[in-house]
Amino acid sequence: MLKQLLTGVAFSLSALTLALPAHAEYPERSIQAVIPWGAGGATDNVMRSLAPYVEKELGTKLILNNRPGGTAVIGSSYVMQQKPNGYTLLLGAENPQLYPVLGLAKFDYSDFYPVNIIGQNVVVIATNADSPFNSMAELLAAAKEKPDTLRMGSTGAGGLPSTVHAMVNAVGELKVREVTFGGDGPGITALMGKHIDFMPLSLAAAQELVRSGKLKALAVLAAEEVPELPGVEPITKALPDIGEYLPWGPFWGAFVHKDTPDDIKQKLVEAYSKAVANEEFQGFLKNYGAQSLNLNGAEAEQFLKRWQSVTAWSMYKAKAIEISPDSVGIEQP
């Protein structure tokens, strides 16, 4: 009797197990990928160019969603608030690394998991094609002669232009008015329309416009000329002391909620690593004037910490921020 009872229980459990749906392997549906900047800018262009290769590796669709605002705080915060199940990615740039010292938010990329640091770009100081300025030295001289009259395009506190502005002021003086836009795309439109006088931009966003003569490059934020813009002087020619902060540049990365299960993190890491290494995407980066990094794990975390340290402390030295980096755990470089 007992044997029959145990057999019946076993059979029931077996039937129940068969009736339960098998747990689908990640990803079982499309993935929402949040770009915290507007359409048409460097971050948007890089992420949309990479997406097809990631989709091929994952076997699913990435639903790209632009959520701009607040120097990427709005989009980044949105991703943090979603379930940590791997179905919401943050496809962002460098900005969150400065939130603690800018007082914009209480988080940075240490509150996410770095799936991949895709690449890094050079910064170019650009002006409109008809600008009277032909070099960084001329721009600095004009700003010194008439302080706070030149209009610089900005993307808000912690955005690339304001960060570069602070680095310049850490070793020199550039007193200008910042005009804020929702991304480098709208800023470029204003620059070409002569509504602003100049704007620090990623080479990825400005390269073709400079090549075609629609924008004029005054300098690149580097210690020597870059092959993508031959003849454009390095910023160290006008500001030799800025060399202590170089090499430096904006970067792009894919991130996921830090509490995402490890097996899902690993699948995303593998997919992005293969996608970034894809020969066609590597060609895109090269044509875009960007350097491929393809970092994950400890290497990605080390890169993020160094970038944060160099940038935050240069801004503090320039008195562009009041919060001391060490007070929020950022060590000196």
Image (cartoon, rainbow, N blue to C red):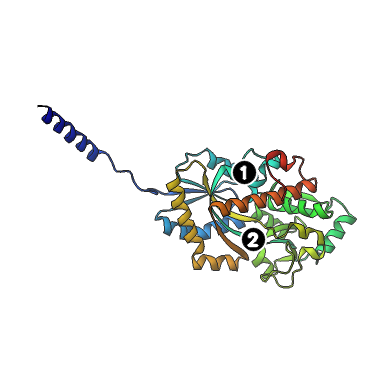
Please state the horizontal and vertical placement of residue 147, each as a whole percent of the image.
87, 52
Residue at 85% x, 56% y is 143
Q: Disc 2 to disc 1, how far (Cα)?
A: 20 Å
Locate residue 55 relative to residue 48 in the image: left or right: left
Q: Which residue lies furthest to the right in this view?
A: 145
In this view, the residue in front, 172 or 186, is 172
Q: Quarter of the image holding residue 193?
A: bottom right
- Residue kind at label 1, given as amino acid type: Asp
Where residue 16 appears, as percent x and y from the top left, is 22, 36
Q: Where is residue 242 in the image (x, y as percent from the top left)?
A: 78, 58
Q: Which amino acid does label 2 sit on?
A: Asn
Q: In this view, does 20 lie above or below 93?
A: above
Residue drawn at point x = 67 percent, y = 62 percent: 122
Mark number, residue 199 = none
The residue at which mark 1 appears reads as 108
Asked whether the viewer can see residue 163, the reply is: yes
The residue mark sitting in front, 2 or 1, is 1
Q: How crowded is mark 2: few (under 14 residues within 10 Å), some or many (20 or more)?
A: many
Q: How many labels does the image show?
A: 2
Q: Which residue lies furthest to the top in this view?
A: 1
Give the SS element for disc 1.
loop
Q: Which mark is residue 121?
A: 2
Instruction: Compare residues 107 and 207 and report the one nearer the observer.
Output: 107
Mark 1 burial class by Cα count in 10 Å: few <14, some 14-19, many 20+ = some
* SS at circle 2: strand
At x 60% / y 65%, what residue is drawn? Answer: 288
Q: Work out whether residue 112 or residue 184 is closer to the camera in this orientation and state it.
A: 112
- Against 247, residue 4 (above or below) is above
